[in-house]
Image (cartoon, helix red, strand yellow):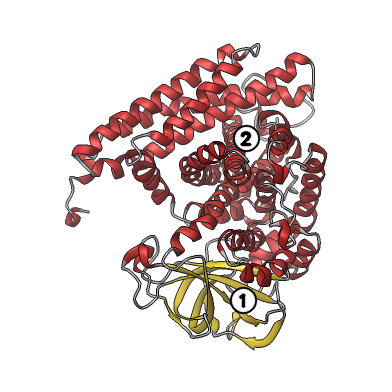
Amino acid sequence: MAAYRAPLADMRFLLANVFAAEELFASMPVTEEVSEDLISAILEEAGKIAEGLLAPINQSGDQQACTWNDGEVTTPTGFKDAYRAYAEGGWAGLTGAVDYGGQGMPKLLSALIEEMFFAANSSFALYAILNTGATLTLSEHASEELKARYLPKMYEGVWSGTMCLTEPHAGTDLGIIRTKAVPEEDGSYRITGTKIFITAGEHDLTENIIHLVLAKLPDAPPGPRGISLFLVPRNMVDENSELTGERNNVSCGSIEHKMGIRASATCVMNFDGARGWLVGELNNGLSNMFTMMNYERLSMGLQGNGLAESSYQTAAQYARERLQGRAPSGVQNPEAAADPIIVHPDVRRMLLTMRANILAGRALSMYAALQLDTSRFHPDNAARARAEQLVALLIPVQKAYASDRGFEACVLGQQVLGGHGYVAEWGQEQNVRDARIAQIYEGANGIQALDLMGRKTVRSNGELLAILLEEIHEFSEQAGTVVGMNRYLPVLVEAGETIKSVTRELISRAEDNPDEVGAASYAYMELLGLVLYAFMWQRILASALQQRNAGAGDQQHLGGLIKTGDFFFARLWPKHKSLVAEIQAGAESLMALSAEEF
């Protein structure tokens, strides 16, 4: 099994050259002290944690899995020690609010750290990101009293957080949840109901677990408008943020036995009149929870990309070392009985498909994270508003497309190894199993596609897409001065015109037939994802060419980036034509069969 290595060279190139991170951070008072040297140092330390602390317990954690006994969950050997080291290193509060003990680092930086952690050990990474998401939600929406009482310990990693949305009968349709919140005279609420699929709902890594729970008051309006958000601690906490010794009426009824992420506890949580406190305003809970959901969905795309990177590293190493057959062009390794399989075109097809999509997926995740940072921290109201609109468009695509391509890459990496990819020794089959869930949770990819097509495109009459197209046009104008970019930029113009034309046609067809939205949604998401990957590759190529033309940087690294970009546009971009044809086929053939004919 190949040892995971953090792809720091690619990450630093994207941060410094493609996204000019230091310049961006300097423009926002909250992040102005985040220098390139600080970024580099943090990334390097995170890479060491991923390589030395998390990766070594990844396979053993999968084999041992979490165990449940009478309501208590035990994580696999090594996880508790690893989480303690993670917390003591200050990582739990990396992006937290400074006023409550956090470090105030931007999402653009933490996104790369998340990718590394997911690549090294996806099960462990889930415990970390759930806490990060919960603290973000509290920081944005909780009262000062709740923030002061809970955030410092959560930033320290002494306590951890979850989000509790799904119920046995209510997944995507949260408007029909049954969990009830009954107000008490002291201002607290009694929460009663059952939540399922709760990641990190119970475990032995921290001394307390803080649940964020969606529930409805007895007299709440029907549907999503009646949902409120509550903070429900597993163990009761006094006004000094100390445990009282009293257990709240929260229990873990069981854990799921899963295809992958087996060292992550996926719990059935029972709330039996548990005491909780309102977060934000009554009946605005779903909106408040979406603060967390946007960040969690970004994380799922990062999970897919991280596992793809892990699979790619193993596959590339194996392809360089595995001797089978001779190169079509003649013997490459005359001193051995065979050539390494990397000489074979089809093996290169698989490896280059993986690498091209990983680099574009990482860049897209960073681009989305950049918009999240801008929407939170930028001093200019117009810049914040524009970034919020881009976030609304980008997140469903990044989550769905990056996790789809991530799973695809893990399957390709397994295929490169052949039979060795199917057995457990090399870790490729675990990557496939772990990556599969990223396409399902935090809103299944079909739902992301429907959200993109329906709410974000048809209902907005293409306004959000128009903002993205402005970004693409602005880049094209600037990149036209880079020597060597003239061969690539026409493709970007084609990409913009293609998605604009298809969008106009879909909006028009949806006026006469609402089924056209759902019929086109997945192919449309894939088309926009491919356009965004093309946009990211254009940005990567412009920066790589600039550096190469100036004789700066690592010339071999730059050459590898440029050649991989050439592969993307020659072999992957043409798939946009089949996606356009699929979209234009319309809803008729999809809706023709009766239910009985299936």
In the figure, is residue 176 to the left or right of 260?
left
Neighbour tally class for label 1: few under 14, some 14-19, many 20 plus, Cα within 10 Å: some
- The quarter holding residue 305 reads top right
Q: Name the spot of residue 74 as percent of width and height, x first.
A: 66, 76
At horizontal 62% and vertical 71% (from top left) the residue drawn is 146
Q: What element carries label 1?
A: strand
Against 149, residue 400 (above or below) is: above
* C-alpha gap between disc 2 and disc 1: 37 Å
Q: Residue at x 63, y 49 (%)?
A: 420
Q: In this view, does 485 lie above or below 356?
A: above
Front residue of 344/23: it is 23
In percent of the image, x 69 and y 86: which residue is there?
Answer: 244
What percent of the width, then of the height, locates residue 157?
72, 66
Describe the element under mark 2 as helix, strand or loop: helix
Badge 2, how many Cα within 10 Å: few under 14, some, many 20+? many
Task: Name the outermost residue toward the bottom.
Answer: 246
Which mark, residue 67? 1
Q: Position of residue 446 (x, y in %)?
A: 39, 49
Under mark 2, the amino acid is Leu
Q: Position of residue 563 (x, y in %)?
A: 64, 22
Within the image, what quadrant is residue 200 found in?
A: bottom right
Instruction: Please name which of the two marks, 2 or 1, marks the residue nearer to the observer.
Output: 2
Q: Can residue 49 be seen in this view?
A: yes
Residue 333 seen in render = no
| Quarter of the figure that contains the C terminus | bottom left
Residue labelled with disc 2? 359
Residue 31, quarter of picture = top right
Viewer-side residue, 269 vs 507: 507
- For marks 2 and 1, the one nearer the N-term is 1
Please give left or right for residue 37 compared with residue 316 in the image: right
